[in-house]
Image (cartoon, coloured by chain):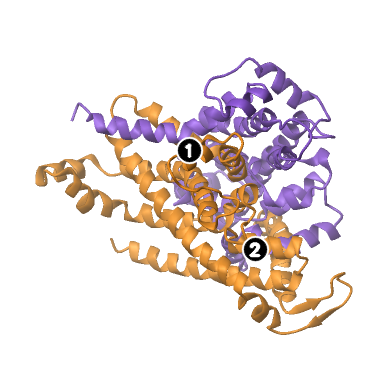
Amino acid sequence: MKRVQFEHSAIPYLFIAPQIIIISIFFLWPSAQAIYQSFLLEDAFGLSSQFVWFKNYSDTILNASWLQAAGFTLVFSSLVTFLSLALALLLAVKANEVIHGASTYKTMLMWAYAIAPPVAGLMGNLMFNPIIGDLYSFMNVIGFDFDHKLDPVDASFVVILISVWKQISINFIFFLAGLQGIPKSVQEAAKMDCNSSTRRFWTITFPLLAPTTFFLVVINITYAFFETFGIIDTTTQGAPGGSTATLVYKVYQDGFRGADIGGSSAQSVVLMIMVLALTVVQFRYIERKVHY
Amino acid sequence: MDRTPISTHIILIIGALFMTLPVWVAFATSTHAPETILREGLQFWPGPHLVETYNEVLFVEGGVMKQVTATTMLQNSMILGIGFAIGKVIISMLAAYAIVYFRFRLGVPLFWVIFMTLLLPLEVRIIPSYEVVANMGLLDTQTGLILPLIASATGTFFFRQFFRSVPDELLEAARLDGATAWGFFKDILVPLSRTMIAAILIIMFVVGWNQYLWPLIMTTKEENYTLVIGIKQIYQVLNEGGELPQFQKAFALTILATLPPVLVVLIFQRWFVKGLVESEK
């Protein structure tokens, strides 16, 4: 907060009103509805509904398909987060070393940020198209019996590859900014103390990047949870057999395709709780970060 | 260290190829005839049909798209991207100003309400949001498309961070000169935030342009499709029997959907990175 502020009056309310009104109508109200509907059982036409307490939760959360989606989400988010962070870090460290052509590399590595996840998904869809897709033929030529329409592992591979590809750019931007934020004097002192560049990286540079890395971990998990919706919808649509459906995708499938409003709402609420938990963890960490 | 080891360049070149090659191949393939693509697969060099393909996709209705051309979809995407960016910047700036520069009774609780919106993306409350917009009669309208999307406070936090870094002396001086709350905002804070506003407009344009789930469920008429939504349709028809699969058109639409946000990011690279990195942390 500012030391100097305006006297309180009606004016601040006028400034904050547009945001609050939009949030109330399009955020608070629907969120409350989601919670309310998660306790209701509606008939297929939405004509009558009945309050059923936690039945929706026990029906949707404890069944095999939700657990499968939860399992996939876990594996998927860990792999996407780890791979895209690792590759981006490698590229950022290398780009930071380069003196000539640095801006060309930077541009080429960061522009994919602007591509929409579903568009990346559609591009991947064509690359893996059985008729024309070179990647599809390539996978089969090198000996995988590859068919992402039938094999859950192959389908997961496609979704993960595209999700990682799409996420490298943004991680790269943040890592590079983090690296460039390390003072020259620190780098030079480190160079005097330690000859091995690998050790220098792990003992000095990487710890200094820790806040950036943590921030990115949270961003990437959120990405893997929510934004990959577009990638999944344009490549596998959760197939085969729901093996590549994340929790968010399942909310959409059950709600819009399956017209199971109560069950879908219950899943939404569970997701909300998961995201809130994630945020609590993040805050704990940020508090610790202050002591550095 | 004057010379960079060759291995560094090799890694960077592989990385750059990995990131750019798919888009290049998509472009190159879009310039070939459907027969060529079907016979030979993806193409790595541009072919002779660039003008023909893009002309057809942009201006000819019918074919796979039936009622809508890419020009219309481009327009819709533009409206969504620009409307989203401008709307977001305006309401975010106003709210951030109230939060940073005023002490008022509901200030703290309202701040927490705004903060909460950061945690829960539209995806988790998608069905009730759809119902609210449907009840207001806003399905298939620009308003219904944009308003629910700007009901999150990312922008407010960008500006809050920025306003807090503005020196206090400015306000003191302005108050000595008798500036009103609105006057200070309009005459001092807004001009001071110019680069920040530009950076956020760019980021939000890209975010708005790239929206998928919300436009997917709330636009039903083809003439309201954005490019990101519209291209999904052509893919669905791709594998249907009868006609020759129009892969080149699918690729052309993919390129069209990619081009505007990529251009914006490339042209305004410096601002974009500045906005992204300085404010998100």
Q: Is residue A198 left or right of residue B56?
A: left
A30 with respect to A267 (left or right): right
Label 1 element class: helix
Number of the label disc, if any, that sits on residue A250: 2
Report which residue position mark 1 lands on. Answer: A138
Q: Amino acid at mark 2?
A: Lys
Circles 2 and 1: CB distance less than 8 Å? no
The residue at 71%/73% (across/down) is A263
In this view, the residue in front, A139 or B273, is A139
Residue A102: where, in percent of width, then height? 34, 28
Q: Residue at image x 40%, y 54%?
A: A82
Q: Amino acid at mark 1?
A: Phe
Q: Look at chain A in the picture and name its colour.
A: orange
- Residue B204 appears in the picture as rendered: yes
Marks 2, 1: nearer the viewer: 1
Q: Quadrant of residue B26?
A: top right
